[in-house]
Image (tube, coloured by chain):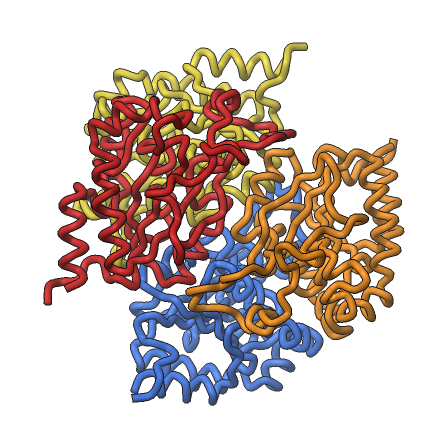
Chain colours: A red, B yellow, C orange, D blue
Amino acid sequence: MTTSIYAREQTALLIVDPYNDFMSEGGKLYAAIKPTADASGLFDNLRKIVPKIRSLGIQVFIVPHHRSCEGDFDGWQHINQFQKAGLPTKAFEVGTWGGEFNPEFGPQKGDVIIKEHWAQSGFANTDLDAQLKQHGIRKIILVGLIANSCIESTARFGMELGYHVTLVPDATAAFSPEGMTAAATNAPMFAHAILKTDELIKALGASAT
Amino acid sequence: MTTSIYAREQTALLIVDPYNDFMSEGGKLYAAIKPTADASGLFDNLRKIVPKIRSLGIQVFIVPHHRSCEGDFDGWQHINQFQKAGLPTKAFEVGTWGGEFNPEFGPQKGDVIIKEHWAQSGFANTDLDAQLKQHGIRKIILVGLIANSCIESTARFGMELGYHVTLVPDATAAFSPEGMTAAATNAPMFAHAILKTDELIKALGASAT
Amino acid sequence: MTTSIYAREQTALLIVDPYNDFMSEGGKLYAAIKPTADASGLFDNLRKIVPKIRSLGIQVFIVPHHRSCEGDFDGWQHINQFQKAGLPTKAFEVGTWGGEFNPEFGPQKGDVIIKEHWAQSGFANTDLDAQLKQHGIRKIILVGLIANSCIESTARFGMELGYHVTLVPDATAAFSPEGMTAAATNAPMFAHAILKTDELIKALGASAT
Amino acid sequence: MTTSIYAREQTALLIVDPYNDFMSEGGKLYAAIKPTADASGLFDNLRKIVPKIRSLGIQVFIVPHHRSCEGDFDGWQHINQFQKAGLPTKAFEVGTWGGEFNPEFGPQKGDVIIKEHWAQSGFANTDLDAQLKQHGIRKIILVGLIANSCIESTARFGMELGYHVTLVPDATAAFSPEGMTAAATNAPMFAHAILKTDELIKALGASAT
């Protein structure tokens, strides 16, 4: 038996924002992330990680961004610049294909779907922390989008809350190479482990032995 | 009367981690931040901002990092890489000069001193949010250290909590130029205003008219 | 001009759990709350408070309980006694009349509908705190159900978060007279104001002058 | 081997507010809690529970109330009635005997001392949640004071956060018999287990087998 690093019943995979608008050709933001996704190998790597996780019986949590709808931010006095700039795009719009989950990386039966987050942290204003505790999770592995926005904020919050946080830089993407660089610069300040996809697969396998 | 942007009674200055170890010559981490502090003009700019804020009667909150002491992290199962690496340094150690507040930028009578934060966000595991609400604060201006660590995490948390967040990049510093660049890349994703010191001074003056 | 206690733009009415199952004849839990609702005058008092609030332009927040659905609590390791006992009832079931809002006390155009809370506090695991801040709210007035459960927990959390909390004991009800007594015993420990409906109406009027 | 209910490494005892002012003869609030403490058997029961917990190696967390000091609540706009009424008492005053921990029920070497809570919930504005996670704790057992104030609020918050919550009504007390009754009425709404001291001792023993 090897040293268990990712005990099955205490580990979760968090798939952040797996919407068609981000992850499917033709999605509103697909072109914006494609260059960094191609460079990191995002989709190929998700195709390695997600099935491996599911085959091991590790719990998957879907951590979805707020989906645009009529009346969004009505009466809000402190809309941030990013939210303001994104308004005309109507990303992940309710009732559109882009606001549906990508069939490959979205939820499957048995996954826990967390309440939508308004901004960047999957923990803020949602039930993510309580759901993780209810499932006995102590270590979270983050994949999906955006490296220096939702992934980074969810990781920063998770660390403060006491979770063990694993980042997988080649299973994420950003709106620019500079975004990827910023995420990489900051990650060692709050992550407990920063693994390449192959390293993660190996660690998961070893933990399961 | 000009348009009021920073209403005196709803605005706060958050001075993050104003310890001797960071801000005073001879401090354990002073040399580490000096290059970027010199480049940004951190100390000169704090000398403009802090007295201006005090003269306007805007409430100052001191947002202090955990101060090292015996037994730190005993029994913690998820110490992050940054905390681990920092252990031998014993930054801001209780009972030492480095763990005392810098006399120029630390608290003065009437300031609110928030509970120490364990990691990077001044909101996490402290009374910052409740204290801001008790004082009627809705807009926070962040200065101090470290740009891509405590400043960025406090800003990210503050935005999620519903505060209007102002960053002042030339009133902060980092452990490397790359840290400053990462902070600058990420800031537009969660900040409501990103101002140079001179722009902030002007906006504060206009608000007070 | 009288002393303003409930400034219009800083005050909110929180209507907690206004579902048909609670508030409409024939609802699954209507009979359970009817004795204490009749004794307190809940419905008559809501008919005074809600229109008054709306006529003054005070913002209404709907604070809804989790609505029962297939798979609820799957995989939860710490379901509490109350949740367990309630499972067969399927209160506020998605897709049923009982899980729809009561037409008289539920949301109207312009109200903010908060994310559903899993247990008792409208703040826990929801966006209530952030939404209140985004709307500039500093004082919350709580009406609806259940006095010693969701109303009390939301009040306790609101106070800790720094809000001014007003309870209106005759605009709530419980599952038993003992529940009403418990709520009344505890209220002075965390509430800032405890008003009868008529006192609230008077205070609102005076504030608006 | 019996079914393990309180696994040693996932269980914590939370001793709430074990100050001399509450727990030692001559303390400012000792007379106020004595009648209900005598009725419940608080001190005798703590003398059974605390040594048993320590002998089993279960982690103890001290959850202390804010200690009165000069300038308390300066500038606070929403002091609650209970805080206001308590101001002249200066309970748990810094620098006085009453603000020191009771030698029998206060911290011992190896205990985790949580940041002081301002009001009633030991989780609010403190590091209790993060510290529990860092120590791998999933079940919390609450003893100490006050039954319907700090104990109840800490229990309500703990449940919402996803912890398994055990109350021990005969190891607490209140300012009045009505306070004890209110706590007893409300407890089944959020607690996962409500045990007498003898039942707890037995369950702990069985878990350790």
Percent of width and height locating residue B116: 39, 46
Residue B93 or residue A207, whichever sits in front: A207
Q: Which residue ends up furthest to the left in the rendered image? A: A1
Residue D198 or residue A35, whichever sits in front: A35
Percent of width and height locating residue A207: 17, 60
* Residue C46 placement, left or right of B93: right
* Residue B155 placement, left or right of B183: right
Q: Is residue B80 above or below residue B103?
A: below
Q: Is residue B64 visible?
A: no
Image quarter (top left, top right, bottom left or bottom right) of the C terminus of chain D: bottom left
Residue under the point 62% across and 29% down: B9
Q: Quadrant of residue A181?
A: top left
Q: Is residue A44 above or below residue D176?
A: above
* Residue B186 placement, left or right of A166: right
Percent of width and height locating residue B58: 56, 27
Residue under the point 63% across and 61% down: D89
Residue under the point 55% across and 86% down: D41
